[in-house]
């Protein structure tokens, strides 16, 4: 539906989009370079094996980053940014996993270009690694 807030039409409730990518050890190093996160869970195989995770895991920012791509590239689409997120990390992601970020529109405001979306990141073995909701603001481009 078109409105002043959505000159190209508002995202429909129930609309879905997804993207997938394989995560690798280089992602851990790139994220560390950006964030400074040098947690041994991401680098020290011996230490990580002794934890509940049983081995090296990637930073949560790598897991959630695929949702930035889905939101900015597909739904709501270009010009979209997160205003608020509520995410629960349910399972670890490891180097070598392929993750799929999925968003589904739950609500669309017609007075402002804001959508509420359901967010999920699933590993290639079907395990949900992250789930929650987010509010997105879309700047008309």
Image: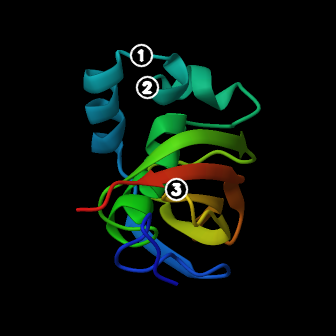
Residue 139 x %, y %: 34, 54
Q: Is residue 67 left or right of residue 55?
A: left
Dots 1 and 2: beta carbons under 8 Å? yes
Residue 55 x %, y %: 60, 37
- Compare marks 1 and 2 and give the one earlier in the sequence: 1
Does 93 sit above or below residue 12? above
Task: Give the residue number, with chain letter if any, for mark 2.
Answer: 43
- Compare marks 3 and 2 and give the one earlier in the sequence: 2
> 131 and 31: which one is in front?
131
> 84 and 27: which one is in front?
84
Q: CA distance from mark 3 to mark 2?
A: 44 Å
Q: Residues within 10 Å of mark 1 (few under 14, many from 20)?
A: some
Q: CA distance from mark 1 to mark 2?
A: 7 Å
Q: Is residue 51 left or right of residue 39?
A: right
Task: Give the residue number, with chain letter if any, for mark 1.
Answer: 38
Does 127 sit above or below residue 26? below
Q: Residue furthest front?
A: 4
Query: Residue at horizontal 71%, vertical 64%?
Result: 127
Of badges 3 and 1, nearer the viewer stands: 3
> 4 and 103: which one is in front?
4
Query: Residue at horizontal 47%, vertical 74%?
Result: 3
> 74 and 128: which one is in front?
74
Q: Is residue 79 left or right of residue 92?
A: left
Q: Secondary structure at mark 2?
A: loop
Residue 99 x %, y %: 51, 63
- Compare marks 3 and 1 and give the one earlier in the sequence: 1
Q: Secondary structure at mark 3?
A: loop
Task: Give the residue number, with chain letter if any, for mark 3.
Answer: 112
Query: Residue at horizontal 49%, vertical 60%?
Result: 97
């Amino acid at each position: 539906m078109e409105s002043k807030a959505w000159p190209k039409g508002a995202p429909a409730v129930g609309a879905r989009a997804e993207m997938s990518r394989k995560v690798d050890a280089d992602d851990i190093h790139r994220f560390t370079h950006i964030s400074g996160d040098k947690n041994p869970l991401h680098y020290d195989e011996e230490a990580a094996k002794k934890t509940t995770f049983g081995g090296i895991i990637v930073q949560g920012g790598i897991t959630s980053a695929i949702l930035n791509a889905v939101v900015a590239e597909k739904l709501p689409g270009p010009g979209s940014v997160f205003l608020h997120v509520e995410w629960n990390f349910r399972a670890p992601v490891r180097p070598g996993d392929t993750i799929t970020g999925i968003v589904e529109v739950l609500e669309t405001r017609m007075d402002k270009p804001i959508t509420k979306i359901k967010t999920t990141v699933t590993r290639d073995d079907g395990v949900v690694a992250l789930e929650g909701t987010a509010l997105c603001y879309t700047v008309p481009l």
